[in-house]
Image: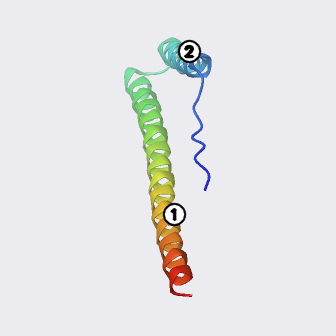
């Protein structure tokens, strides 16, 4: 059975936080400097916030599914090992 659990490095985490902050600043600057009405700027701002939220939600849902599948597979492996162990004791 494989017990390897991948972990991201601190450098990678800082890099992703930096990239997110930079993208948010660039998006805010772009919307602020846009030559459009206040309503249009508000629409683009709400769309950008909703896009970020949706991306985080999808990522969390996929990760939750992956972890649930991993737990389910561990349970199935344990059941299989128990059945094999019981059948080998009866022989």
Res 73 label: 1
Q: Residues within 10 Å of mark 2 (few under 14, many from 20)?
A: few
Can you tell which quarter of the image residue 23 is in? top right
Res. 30 image quadrant:
top right
Residue 67 to residue 32: above or below? below
Residue 3: percent from left, percent from top: 58, 47
Closest to the observer, 28 or 23? 23
Q: Is residue 7 above or below residue 25?
A: below
The alpha-carbon separation of the residues under discs 2 and 1 comes to: 36 Å
Residue 39, located in which quarter of the rendered image? Answer: top left
Find residue 55 and report its horizontal and vertical position in percent. Answer: 49, 40
Comparing labels 2 and 1, the label whose residue is closer to the camera:
1
> Residue at the spot x=45%, y=65% of the render?
75
Indicate how the structure is coloured in the image. Answer: rainbow
Where residue 10 appears, as percent x and y from the top left, is: 56, 18
Residue at 44% x, 50% y is 64
Dot 1: few (<14), some (14–19), or many (≥20) neighbours within 10 Å? few
Residue marked by disc 2: 18
Tell me what residue is drawn at x 52 percent, y 19 percent.
Answer: 17
């Amino acid at each position: 059975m494989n017990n390897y659990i991948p972990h991201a490095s601190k450098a990678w985490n800082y890099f992703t936080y930096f990239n997110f902050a930079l993208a948010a600043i660039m998006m805010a600057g772009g919307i602020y400097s846009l030559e459009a009405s206040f309503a249009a700027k508000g629409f683009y701002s709400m769309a950008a916030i909703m896009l970020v939220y949706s991306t985080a939600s999808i990522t969390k849902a996929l990760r939750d599914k992956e972890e649930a599948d991993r737990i389910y597979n561990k349970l199935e492996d344990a059941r299989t090992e128990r059945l094999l162990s019981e059948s080998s004791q009866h022989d």
